[in-house]
Every structure is written in C-alpha cells, then in structure tokens.
Amino acid sequence: DQQVKQNSPSLSVQEGRISILNCDYTNSMFDYFLWYKKYPAEGPTFLISISSIKDKNEDGRFTVFLNKSAKHLSLHIVPSQPGDSAVYFCAAAGGGADGLTFGKGTHLIIQP
Amino acid sequence: NAGVTQTPKFRVLKTGQSMTLLCAQDMNHEYMYWYRQDPGMGLRLIHYSVGEGTTAKGEVPDGYNVSRLKKQNFLLGLESAAPSQTSVYFCASSTLSGVGTDTQYFGPGTRLTVL
C-alpha cells in the first residue's frame, strides 16, 4: 500500500508561470515532509522541507504548503524556469517508518 | 567537500555473481542509507545504519547485506545477484541531531544490470 502518492506522473508548465506539484499521504503519523529534485543520471537533491507543526515554508522561488487535515502537501515554484525541468519526489519521515518514504515522482517539464 | 560519493557508477553482472557497492560521506553524518529506484517507482529503502558498527533492515532487504565498519563508509553487498536486482542504487546520509535531522543527502547513484 503506497503511503505517499504523487498522482501526476508528468506536468508541463510554461516558463515564467507557476508550477504546482501535489502529494498526498495516508499515514497520519508522518511528521516531516521533504521535496527532492532529480535530474537524469544524478542523485536526488534536497529542495525544501516542512515540519508537521507548520502549514507553509518558503525558500526563494519555492514554497511548500501542508494541509494536515487533508493529508496533502504541494510544492509551488514561481516563476518556473527551464532549469526546473526535472523529476520531483515528495518524501515523508516519521510514522514508525525507517528512512524516508517516497512518492513515485512527478516529471516537471518547463516549456519556453 | 565531496558530500556523498558512490563507487562504481555502472556495473554489469551475470546471475549468481557477487559484488559490493561502496558509499562514502565526508559530512560526519551518523546515519547512512541504501535505496533502490526502479522505473516508475520512488526510492525504496534497502538497509540503513544509525552509527558505526550498526545496521538495520529497511523495506526491501532480501538478497542484500551491508556493513558499516567506519563511520564514513557504508557498503552494500549482493552475494548472488539476480535479474530482479537490476536497478539504480542510491546511498544517502543524514545528521544525528538538530533541525532537519530527517534531511538526507544523496550520492549520484550506481546503475546495476544483472543479466
């Protein structure tokens, strides 16, 4: 049973617009959430995180929102740039799980 | 400061062969992890270590063994490789205490093919 779900395998956004990537989770005991960015043939790179005691965390162009009641988080990228084209993984920590629990990823494509 | 490095980058094995993947980190992190990523899947935890001399099983440990003899190194072994172990393997590390202890830093990956 997948505990972290990213239901959009891919997303295409025009350069300069907002990119919104979504993630849902089922384990209410998760207490820390992270977003990773991955380019082909490279390892995942940490992007931004949020603790379950917050509902928003911002870092430059990247903002993560957490809705605990809906068990949903989203990553907003504004404005989107060509270098943002990558696969984005949502991950969760805690909940009795060892390590991080990852979603399957969303391939973001920024179109010029 | 190289972060997390992995050796080798690529490897092709025949069924039944053995090999060891090496992970090294220079961030003085206590925790180290091995994940595998298969096409269309997220990363899945194989084994992890919370300190030198300790190891524990993750979500998909069967067919793998690990050792953490030195704090900076974490080895992943395949004793008898099977085609189902064809995957990309990622090593990660994280710190023990303080803010962001769950943030893991990943190596570049090892692409393993078992024929």
Image (cartoon, coloured by chain):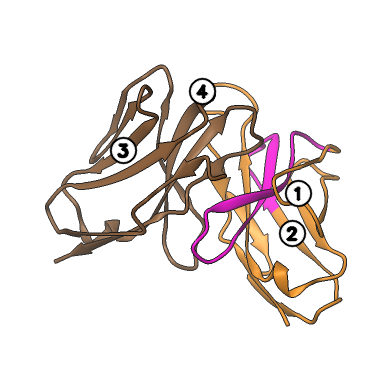
Q: How far apart are marks 1 and 4 (CA)?
A: 24 Å
| Mark 4 lies on residue | B99
Q: Distance between the residues labelled 3 and 1?
A: 35 Å
Residue A67 vertical placement versus B9 (above, below): above
Residue beneath the point at 85% across and 76% down: B17
Please report the bounds of the magenta region as a residue range: B24-52
In this rendered view, identify the residue nearer to me: B101 or A102.
A102
* Callouts 1 and 4 on one subunit: yes
Callout 3 crowding tier (Cα within 10 Å): few <14, some 14–19, many ≥20: some
In this rendered view, identify the residue nearer to me: B80 or A1.
A1
Q: How far apart are marks 1 and 2 (CA)?
A: 7 Å
Q: Considering the numbered disc 1 on the image, is that residue within a helix, a strand or a loop?
A: strand
Q: Considering the numbered disc 2 on the image, is that residue within a helix, a strand or a loop?
A: strand
Marks 2 and 3 in Cβ contact (< 8 Å): no
Q: Which chain carries label 3?
A: A
Can you tell which mark lies on residue B73? 1
Q: How far apart are marks 2 and 3 (CA)?
A: 35 Å
Callout 4 crowding tier (Cα within 10 Å): few <14, some 14–19, many ≥20: few
| Mark 2 lies on residue | B22
Marks 1 and 2 in Cβ contact (< 8 Å): yes
Callout 1 crowding tier (Cα within 10 Å): few <14, some 14–19, many ≥20: some
